[in-house]
Amino acid sequence: MKNSFNIWILIFLIPLTIMGQTDDLDRQIQDQERTLKELRKSIDQLNSKISRSQKDKQATAAEIHRLDKQITMISQLKRELQKESRLKEQQIDLLIETIKSTDEKITALKKRAARRAVYAYKLGRNRDIDLLLTSGDINQALRRSTYLSAITKAEKQTLAELEAMIQSNRSNQNNLARTVGSLKRNIEERERASRDIAAKQGKKKRQLKNIDQNITALKADLETKQRGKQKLQETISELINQRASKYKSTSNFAKNKGSLRWPVRGQLVGRFGPHKNEKLGTVTHNPGIDIAAAKGKDVHAVQDGYVVAITWIPGYGNTLIIDHGDNFYTVYAHIDNIKVAMDNKIFLDQVIAQVSDTGSLHGSRLHFEVWQGENKVDPIIWLRR
């Protein structure tokens, strides 16, 4: 009897557990669909803007930066589609499990209803009256009457439950078919995104071969970087004004001067400070350092902190800013496959992104800056020697 009771508990509780998981997945998928909708809208707006402004097909720094941004956004779309795909695969597994569990429950309820029907048939129609008439006293008769009424009520409830579960299974089977179809469309969109990325990367590579000798293009790139520096300055100033006391950091950033870990291992190809461009005859100031590294190499946080900005900056490409408290910020640019989100708590050595060539005309590299308030400081004196 105990084993039978335990089986019934499992039959009725397992679907409830699955239902909770399904609801949670539904919410996650809805959130993911909103993210994808916004991302697709941004890509369409960018493509429309490029179509209106693009008058010549020559290799220019502006054209390469536009291609770069397209590649970055389509790559992000592909990653978000992959997230949605994983969620829908989980949803499909749960729907199959739910349908199977409900089928088992329907079978069990049908068997129970059949046993009751056989029992009622064997007793005969007058058996209920006989049970009441043979009661020892009025109290016993009332108890028997209540019991018989409960059986009838239970049978009606069982039939109602069966009907509800059959309808639920039909609904789940329809949902399963729709989800499978949606997953198929997701895979097709990812494949299109992959082809689009490959085509644009090929175009960018062809244009990069010629641009190094194009003085006009190099000047345009220099102007783009200057605009990027100005935008980053404005971003830092805004963060200081808006987030002055939002985060309480215990990383003691200032005390670790000269011992911070390097964000990535590679070749130092650009130092902090003034740089003369021999081809253009100009002197520019590098607000950070540049570390050449293989595309896809992990980028690490140099200290604990909070993510306060994830953005695209001209000349910088994908850019991430971490607030370390006490008005110290670190900037990571020319990155891709960002693995953290806004307001995330970040820990020392945590992988936050990967090295890329977003915003760069000189191959994959990490651009790294250290800010103390609104002042740029030389990262080299902060990093471990």
Image (cartoon, helix red, strand yellow):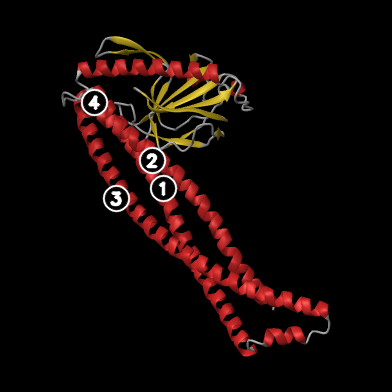
The residue singled out by tag 4 in the image is: 63
Contact (Cβ within 8 Å) of mark 2 with mark 1? yes
Which mark sits nearer the N-terminus, 4 or 2?
A: 2
Type of amino acid under label 4: Glu
The residue singled out by tag 2 in the image is: 36
Q: Percent position (x, y) of residue 241?
A: 54, 16
CA separation in Å, label 4 and label 1: 31 Å
The residue singled out by tag 1 in the image is: 84
Rate crowding at label 2 as few (under 14), some (14 to 19) or many (20 or more) other CA atoms within 10 Å: some
Q: Which of marks 4 and 3 is in front?
A: 3
Type of amino acid under label 1: Glu
Q: In this view, does 97 lie to the left or right of 78?
A: right
Rate crowding at label 1 as few (under 14), some (14 to 19) or many (20 or more) other CA atoms within 10 Å: many
Quadrant position of residue 152: bottom right
Contact (Cβ within 8 Å) of mark 3 with mark 2? no
Which mark sits nearer the N-terminus, 2 or 1?
A: 2
Q: Which of marks 4 and 1 is in front?
A: 1
CA separation in Å, label 4 and label 2: 26 Å
The structure residue drawn at horizontal position 62% and vertical position 26%, both measured from the top left corner, is 249
Contact (Cβ within 8 Å) of mark 4 with mark 2? no
Q: Percent position (x, y) of residue 185?
A: 32, 51
User: Disc number at residue 188?
Assistant: 3
Q: Which of marks 4 and 2 is in front?
A: 2
Q: Which of 176 and 118 is in front in this view?
A: 118
CA separation in Å, label 3 and label 2: 15 Å
Q: In this view, does 175 lie to the left or right of 345?
A: left
Judging from the image, what secondary structure is the residue with disc 2 in? helix
Type of amino acid under label 3: Glu
Rate crowding at label 4 as few (under 14), some (14 to 19) or many (20 or more) other CA atoms within 10 Å: some
The structure residue drawn at horizontal position 22% and vertical position 23%, both measured from the top left corner, is 53
